[in-house]
């Protein structure tokens, strides 16, 4: 028997259907609300509004659960790889041997950028933020194959999406090398996805870096843990752009721009800046936390809190454990990790954070790992974008494959001036 809710308003009652998800989540289907009542709903920031149904990722914010296509993030982080998870998110199941090889072979086929794209890199000033370079070069990459900027063609999705996942790391590495005045290093066909990225970032044309397996595994896990996360700000942006039937490069470039914000993907860079600031002031974090709680200047404990998790972000737990392991294996210590651990320990005993259900999120420890790998702070959000690309593509595909999908067009409640007539310039008074 289908579930319904009854809404009473202005002496009338309407019944609205309730849709039930595979994990028991329920949503009131308001598709006919305005026709039946003249009402729309209002939900600033969409915190209580489902924009779609989706089969890709499930989050239970109260219990701290995250699953990609039903697989718990803890199992995937331990047993899978970023490339395998990318296939899982996009195509719905773990790949068989043949699918995995074909997918990896396409990454190799597309890993080199069109040589003319180097002129675009040369056009950026040395201090251009790599997220600005990434979003513009993703669209630029689409311009080098005319079919890519044509309206979306489902028969070419497999190749276009593989090209995007492959080239996002080449663009990122080239942006880093340019910012340091270093020569570009081309990818090597014999290297796997994450190995090739580290090679392009840190080798020299005459001297390949020694790829530490632990370092490759740690970064591959960072990419995997960032691969998708339900309808977050940047993924919703990708779906919004996809709903207009724009191509996959335009949708992904829009996702990069949304991710850049310090409240979203930019938080990993903000966490490192925060820890560095705390250390430079000789604070162990206690003074900083008092400042945050006083709300002076709107300072926040970056890397803490989440729009959905009211519990520990499961990704933060995994990354924290990997931090310890990697630093031990690389025989490195990091005073910023000590500050982060102290901040977490203190905050999780403090009523300000406990009352507001503020726990470490994915960004709180990820920067410590990236710092240990030699990745500069300004590239942290780019790492997030490389990781999130398969999730954006999976959501793009879900919009494109849905025969009922329409252009996303939210309503609003207008609160501006009511009707008024034009006043000629000579009759206008100073405001
Ligand atoms: C990501 O959506 C996703 O899935 C995102 C993501 C993904 O994988 O795509 O998980 C990735 O973006 C993780 C979040 C990264 N951002 C940060 O770490 C920035 C710091 N965190 C916050 O700014 C904040 O927690 C948000 C933006 C993450 C969530 O904000 P909300 O849910 O809108 O919370 P809010 O701003 O309404 O705050 C509620 C209260 C307020 O205090 P009161 O008005 O009740 O007194 O909690 C306070 C806030 O001031 N608060 C914080 C805080 N976060 C919220 N106080 C101090 N430090 C913080 N970090």
Image (cartoon, rainbow, N blue to C red):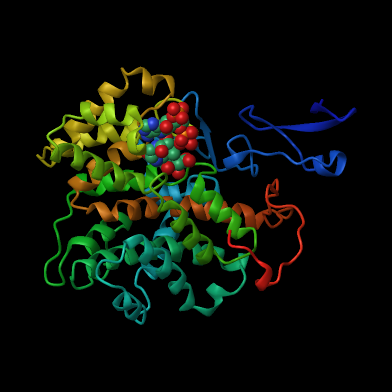
Q: Residue placed at 51% from the left, 33% from the top?
A: 59
* Closest to the observer, 81 or 345: 345
Q: Is residue 46 left or right of residue 402?
A: left
Ligand 1 quadrant?
Answer: top left
* Closest to the observer, 219 or 49: 49
Q: Residue placed at 30% from the left, 23% from the top?
A: 347
Q: Is residue 117 above or below residue 221?
A: below
Which quadrant of the view contains residue 204? bottom left
Task: Give the number of callouts.
Answer: 0
Which quadrant of the view contains residue 209? bottom left
* Closest to the observer, 343 or 97: 343
Q: Find the residue positioned furthest to the right.
A: 11
Q: Position of residue 98 (x, y in %)?
A: 45, 55
For the N terminus, the image quarter is top right
* Closest to the observer, 316 or 90: 316
Q: Is residue 321 left or right of residue 163?
A: left
For the C terminus, the image quarter is bottom right
Answer whether residue 111 is visible to the viewer in this image.
yes
Q: Is residue 162 above or below residue 415?
A: below
Q: Position of residue 288 (x, y in %)?
A: 24, 31
Q: Residue placed at 66% from the left, 33% from the top?
A: 21
Q: Residue placed at 17% from the left, 64% from the top?
A: 203
Q: Position of residue 348 (x, y in %)?
A: 32, 21
Answer whether residue 314 is visible to the viewer in this image.
no
Q: Position of residue 239 (x, y in %)?
A: 58, 54
Q: Find the residue positioned furthest to the left.
A: 331
Q: Is residue 262 left or right of residue 209?
A: right
């Amino acid at each position: 028997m289908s579930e319904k809710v009854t809404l009473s308003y202005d002496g009338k009652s309407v019944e609205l259907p309730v849709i039930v998800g595979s994990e028991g989540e329920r949503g009131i289907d308001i598709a006919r609300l305005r026709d039946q009542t003249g009402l729309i709903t209002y939900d600033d920031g969409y915190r209580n509004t489902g924009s779609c149904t989706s089969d890709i990722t499930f989050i239970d914010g109260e219990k701290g659960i995250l699953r990609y296509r039903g697989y718990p993030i803890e199992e995937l982080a331990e047993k899978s790889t970023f490339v395998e998870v990318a296939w899982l998110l996009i195509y719905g199941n773990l790949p068989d041997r043949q699918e995995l090889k074909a997918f990896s072979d396409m990454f190799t086929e597309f890993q080199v950028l069109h040589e003319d794209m180097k002129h675009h890199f040369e056009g950026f000033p040395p201090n251009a933020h790599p997220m600005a370079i990434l979003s513009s070069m993703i669209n630029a990459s689409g311009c080098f194959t005319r079919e890519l900027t044509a309206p979306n063609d489902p028969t070419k999705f497999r190749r276009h999406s593989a090209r995007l996942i492959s080239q996002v790391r080449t663009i990122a590495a080239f942006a880093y090398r340019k910012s340091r005045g270093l020569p570009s290093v081309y990818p090597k066909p014999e290297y796997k996805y994450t190995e090739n990225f580290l090679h392009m970032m840190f080798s020299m044309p005459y001297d390949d870096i020694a790829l530490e397996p632990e370092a490759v595994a740690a970064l591959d896990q960072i990419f995997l843990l960032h691969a998708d996360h339900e309808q977050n700000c940047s993924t919703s942006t990708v779906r919004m752009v996809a709903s207009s039937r724009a191509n996959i490069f335009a949708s992904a470039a829009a996702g990069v721009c949304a991710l850049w914000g310090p409240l979203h993907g930019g938080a990993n860079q903000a966490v490192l800046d925060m820890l560095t600031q705390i250390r430079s002031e000789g604070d162990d974090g206690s003074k900083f936390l008092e400042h945050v709680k006083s709300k002076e200047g709107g300072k926040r404990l970056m890397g803490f809190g989440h729009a959905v998790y009211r519990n520990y972000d499961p990704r933060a737990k995994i990354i924290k454990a990997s931090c310890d392991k990697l630093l031990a294996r690389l025989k490195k210590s990091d005073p910023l990790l000590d500050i982060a651990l102290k901040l977490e320990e203190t905050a999780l005993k403090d009523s300000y954070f406990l009352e507001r259900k503020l726990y470490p999120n994915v960004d709180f420890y990820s920067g410590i790992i990236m710092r240990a790998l030699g990745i500069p702070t300004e590239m942290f959000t780019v790492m997030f974008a490389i990781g999130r690309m398969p999730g954006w593509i999976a959501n793009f595909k879900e919009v494109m494959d849905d025969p009922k999908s329409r252009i996303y067009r939210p309503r609003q409640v207008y609160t501006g001036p009511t009707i008024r007539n034009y006043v000629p310039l000579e009759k206008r008074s100073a405001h």
